[in-house]
C-alpha cells in the first residue's frame, strides 16, 4: 500500500465551510490526488455536515481516543470524494452543533477540548488504519497539535519514525490560545511546555505547537511569509517564526476553477469567458439579472457596480467601506455587500441600505450561489483588508472579469498587478485608510467611465490569470520531496 499525504483540517468544502479554509481544503488535496500524489483527508463530522451528494458510511466504531478520560472513543465515517478518501471523526457532544467554532455569543467554551480530542482522534485513527502516512499536513490551530504529537511520539514509537509533518498557517491571527491548565492531560510531555514549544505568555497555544514542531511550516502566500516575521503581522508569534525561518515557506494558494469559472458556473444566468465571441455581453446579462434579483435600480446597468464579499470584521476592512459609502453615492455607483460577522457592522450596513435604497444592497449571511452571482454581476470587486494571508475572492474576481480594488498586503500583493501598469489586472492602495481606499476606487471608476477599450483589456488580462491548484500543487510536491518523499 502506497503511503499517503494525510491532510488534517477542521473544515472541507463541500462537506463543511465557514470561509477560505474550507475552500482550500476542498481543492488542494484533490488537486494533488489528481497529480498522482496519494492523499486523504481527516475532518470532524459536524452536525451541519453536507453529505447528500456523496456516499458516507461508518467505517470504524469505537476507535479509542482516551481524551479527556481514558475510555472515550470516536466513530469514524468515510466518503469517496472523486476517488479520494475523506474520513470524518464523530463524537456528538463535540461536533454536533449548529456552528463550527462559535455562535452569536462568542467562541464555544470548550473549543480547546474539542480540538485536542480531534487531533488525538486523528492519530488514533491513523494507528488503527495500520499504515503510517508519509506526510501529516495540518492546517491552522485546530490541527496544530498533530505535528507536536508526531514530533514526540516518533521518538519512541517505530510506527511514526518515517512520517514527516507540514503545518500550514492560513491565518496567524487565529492562534487557538487557551488557559494553561488545559495543557495537562492533552497528551504532550512536560518538556513541550517551554517558550520554544507550546507555552505562550503563560497560555497554551495550539497554533504555536504546530509551528514549533512541524518539519516544515508554510503560509498561503509568499508575501505573508515575509510579513509575519515582524511585529506588525506576527501576532506575537514572530519570535518562534524567526526561529523556524529556515523551515518556513510561502506557497500561494490556488483557486478551484472547476467551481469558480464563469464559463461553466451553474449558479449564473448566463455563462461567459475571455474568448466569448459576443465579448462581455454575458457578463452584462449577469449584471442586469443581479440588479433585478437584489432590487437595485435598473439604471445601474450603465454605471459601475462595486461588490464586497467577506466577513464583516475589521480584518476585511468592512468599516473602511462603510465609512466612504456617502462619498461613493455621490458618484452614482451601486454597492453590493454580502457577509456576516460583527453585529455593529451588520447593523450599519443595513442602515445604509435603507438610506440608499435602490443603490446599495446589504445581504447579511452567506450563500454560495449569491456569491457567484455577485462576482459575475459586479464591475469592480472591493477587498480593503487590513491583512490578507492569501485571499481567494480576489482570485475569483479576476477569473470573473471583475478587477479588484485591494490593499497591497499579503496574497493581494502577490495576485494583483496594479494599475497603471500596462499589464494591470486591478488597483491597489498602500495601507488601510479610508481616504486611500476611496481614491483607489475613484481611479477604477474613472477608468471604467472613460476608457472602455482599456477596461475591457484589463478584464481580459484578469480572466486569463492562472492561479490554478495544479500550479500551486507543484510547489507542494517539491516541498514533500524536500521531506524525503517523491510521489512521481
Image (tube, rainbow, N blue to C red):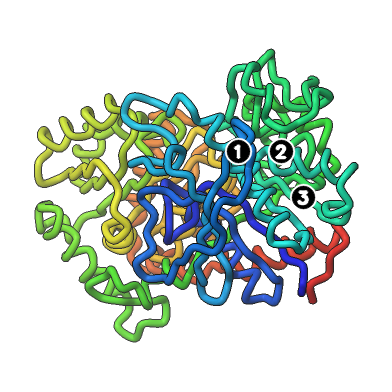
- Is 263 placed left or right of 40 in the picture? left
Spatial distance from mark 1 to mark 2, Cα to Cα? 27 Å
Of callouts 2 and 3, which one flags the residue occurring earlier in the amino acid sequence? 3
Element at label 1:
loop
Q: Are marks 3 and 1 in contact (CB under 8 Å)?
A: no
Residue name at image x 36 percent, y 82 percent: 276
Q: Are marks 2 and 3 in contact (CB under 8 Å)?
A: no
User: In what quadrant of the picture does the N terminus appear?
Assistant: bottom right
Of callouts 1 and 2, which one flags the residue occurring earlier in the amino acid sequence? 1
How packed mark 3 is, by other alpha carbons closer than 10 Å (few <14, some 14-19, many 20 or more), is many
Percent across and percent down for residue 50 are 37, 59
How packed mark 1 is, by other alpha carbons closer than 10 Å (few <14, some 14-19, many 20 or more), is few
The residue that disc 2 covers is 210
Percent across and percent down for residue 384 are 43, 38
- The numbered disc on residue 88 is none
Percent across and percent down for residue 195 are 79, 20
- The numbered disc on residue 165 is 3
Residue name at image x 66 percent, y 48 percent: 138
Residue extending farthest front: 71
Of callouts 3 and 1, which one flags the residue occurring earlier in the amino acid sequence? 1
Q: Kindly report which numbered mark, 3 or 1, lies closer to the viewer in this rendering.
A: 1
Residue name at image x 11 percent, y 60 percent: 292
Residue situated in front as seen by the camera: 153 or 233: 153
Q: Kindly report which numbered mark, 1 or 2, lies closer to the viewer in this rendering.
A: 1
Residue situated in front as seen by the camera: 110 or 27: 110
Residue situated in front as seen by the camera: 426 or 123: 123
The residue that disc 1 covers is 71
Element at label 2:
helix
Element at label 3:
strand
238 shown above or below 49: above
Q: Quadrant of residue 423?
A: bottom right
Amino acid at each position: 500500500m502506497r503511503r499517503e499525504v494525510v491532510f488534517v483540517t477542521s473544515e472541507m468544502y463541500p462537506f463543511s465551510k465557514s470561509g477560505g479554509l474550507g475552500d482550500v481544503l476542498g481543492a488542494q488535496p484533490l488537486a494533488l490526488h489528481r497529480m498522482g500524489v496519494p492523499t486523504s483527508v481527516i475532518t470532524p463530522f459536524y452536525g451541519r455536515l453536507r453529505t447528500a451528494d456523496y456516499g458516507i458510511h461508518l467505517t470504524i466504531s469505537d476507535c479509542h481516543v482516551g481524551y479527556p478520560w481514558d475510555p472515550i472513543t470516536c466513530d469514524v465515517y468515510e466518503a469517496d470524494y472523486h476517488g479520494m478518501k475523506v474520513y470524518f471523526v464523530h463524537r456528538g457532544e463535540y461536533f454536533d452543533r449548529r456552528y463550527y467554532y462559535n455562535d452569536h455569543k462568542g467562541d464555544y467554551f470548550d473549543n480547546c477540548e474539542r480540538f485536542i480530542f480531534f487531533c488525538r482522534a486523528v492519530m488514533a485513527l491513523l494507528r488503527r488504519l495500520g499504515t503510517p502516512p508519509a506526510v501529516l499536513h495540518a492546517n491552522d490551530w485546530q490541527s496544530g497539535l498533530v505535528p507536536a504529537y508526531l514530533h514526540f511520539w516518533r521518538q519512541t514509537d517505530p510506527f511514526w519514525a518515517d512520517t514527516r509533518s507540514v503545518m500550514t498557517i492560513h491565518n496567524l491571527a487565529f492562534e487557538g490560545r487557551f488557559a494553561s491548565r488545559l495543557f495537562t492531560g492533552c497528551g504532550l510531555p512536560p518538556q513541550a511546555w517551554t517558550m520554544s514549544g507550546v507555552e505562550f505568555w503563560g497560555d497554551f497555544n495550539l497554533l504555536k505547537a504546530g509551528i514549533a514542531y512541524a518539519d516544515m511550516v508554510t503560509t498561503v502566500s509568499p508575501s505573508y511569509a515575509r510579513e509575519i516575521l515582524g511585529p506588525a503581522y506576527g501576532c506575537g508569534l514572530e519570535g518562534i517564526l524567526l526561529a523556524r525561518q529556515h523551515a518556513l515557506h510561502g506557497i500561494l494558494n490556488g483557486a478551484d476553477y472547476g467551481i469558480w469559472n464563469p464559463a461553466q458556473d451553474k449558479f449564473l444566468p448566463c455563462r461567459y469567458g475571455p474568448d466569448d465571441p459576443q465579448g462581455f455581453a454575458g457578463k452584462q446579462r449577469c449584471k442586469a439579472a443581479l440588479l433585478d434579483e437584489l432590487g437595485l435600480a435598473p439604471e445601474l446597468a450603465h454605471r459601475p457596480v462595486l461588490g464586497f464579499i467577506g466577513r464583516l470584521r475589521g480584518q476585511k476592512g468592512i468599516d473602511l467601506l462603510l465609512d466612504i459609502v456617502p462619498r461613493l453615492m455621490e458618484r452614482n455607483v451601486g454597492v453590493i455587500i454580502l457577509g456576516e460577522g460583527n453585529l455593529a457592522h451588520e447593523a450599519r450596513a443595513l442602515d445604509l441600505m435603507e438610506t440608499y435604497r435602490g443603490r446599495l444592497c446589504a445581504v447579511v449571511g452567506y450563500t454560495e450561489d449569491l456569491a457567484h452571482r455577485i462576482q459575475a454581476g459586479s464591475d469592480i470587486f472591493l477587498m480593503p483588508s487590513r491583512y490578507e494571508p492569501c485571499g481567494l475572492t480576489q482570485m475569483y474576481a479576476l477569473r470573473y472579469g471583475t478587477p479588484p480594488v485591494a490593499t497591497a498586503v499579503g496574497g493581494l500583493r502577490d495576485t494583483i498587478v496594479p494599475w497603471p501598469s500596462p499589464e494591470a489586472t486591478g488597483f491597489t492602495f498602500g495601507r488601510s485608510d479610508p481616504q486611500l481606499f476611496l481614491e483607489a476606487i475613484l481611479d477604477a471608476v474613472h477608468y471604467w467611465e472613460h476608457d472602455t477599450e482599456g477596461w475591457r483589456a484589463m478584464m481580459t488580462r484578469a480572466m486569463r490569470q492562472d492561479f490554478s491548484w495544479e500550479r500551486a500543487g507543484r510547489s507542494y510536491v517539491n516541498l514533500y520531496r524536500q521531506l524525503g518523499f517523491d510521489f512521481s
